[in-house]
Amino acid sequence: MSSQHSDIDAPPLEPIDEVIEHEHSDFRARCLALVAPFLSKGDWEAKRELVTRNPKWGLIWRGDYAIADLAPRLVNRFMCWEGEDGQLLIEIAVGQRIAPLPATSPADPSDRTT
């Protein structure tokens, strides 16, 4: 749950037991447009991204990013999902001790994250 907005129920940072979704380029593009202002203002480099489906939150886009001069062994992650009102919500997690997003192959839509 977000500490700044305690009324927002956020998905988990890690995509555990979620189905990997390969056919949601529109959702991905909408999420990327939301985080673009953050990326353009700093020394942030995209590493990996992933769209999954969670039974509670629906589609979730997660993107891992490296931030220059900031603990390279920790994970920095953007997360984007659609709220109950249909608006996209984002969470930014910096310096987390979580696993990086998996490398995925678009070939198998039945993939699950571990």
Image: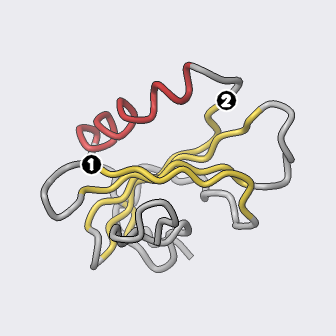
**Which residue does the image show at 29% across and 70% down from the upper left?**
57
Q: Nearer the viewer, residue 27 or 82?
A: 82
Query: Alpha carbon of mark 2 to alpha carbon of mark 1: how far?
Result: 22 Å
Number of labelled discs? 2
Tag 1: amino acid: Leu
Q: Is residue 23 left or right of residue 11?
A: left
Whether the residues at callouts 2 and 1 have beta carbons within 8 Å, the answer is no
Q: Position of residue 24 (x, y in %)?
A: 26, 47
Tag 2: amino acid: Trp
Q: Position of residue 45 (x, y in %)?
A: 67, 30
Q: Determine crowd level at label 2: few under 14, some 14-19, many 20+ residues with C-alpha closer than 10 A.
A: some
Q: Quadrant of residue 69?
A: top right
Which image quarter is the C terminus in? bottom right
Q: Position of residue 105 (x, y in %)?
A: 50, 51
Q: Quadrant of residue 35?
A: top left
Q: Nearer the viewer, residue 6 or 70?
A: 6
In the picture of the structure, the residue carrying the numbered disc 1 is 88
**Which residue does the image show at 28% across and 39% down from the upper left?**
25
Q: Position of residue 26 (x, y in %)?
A: 23, 38
- Residue 19 has which mark? none
- First in residue order: circle 2 vs circle 1: 2
**Which residue does the image show at 43% across and 68% down from the upper left?**
111
Q: Is residue 37 above or below residue 29?
A: above
**Residue pushed farthest top?**
40
**Which residue does the image show at 28% across and 78% down from the upper left?**
56
In the picture of the structure, the residue carrying the numbered disc 2 is 44
Helix, strand or loop at mark 1: strand
Q: Is residue 45 above or below residue 99?
A: above
Q: Is residue 1 left or right of residue 59?
A: right
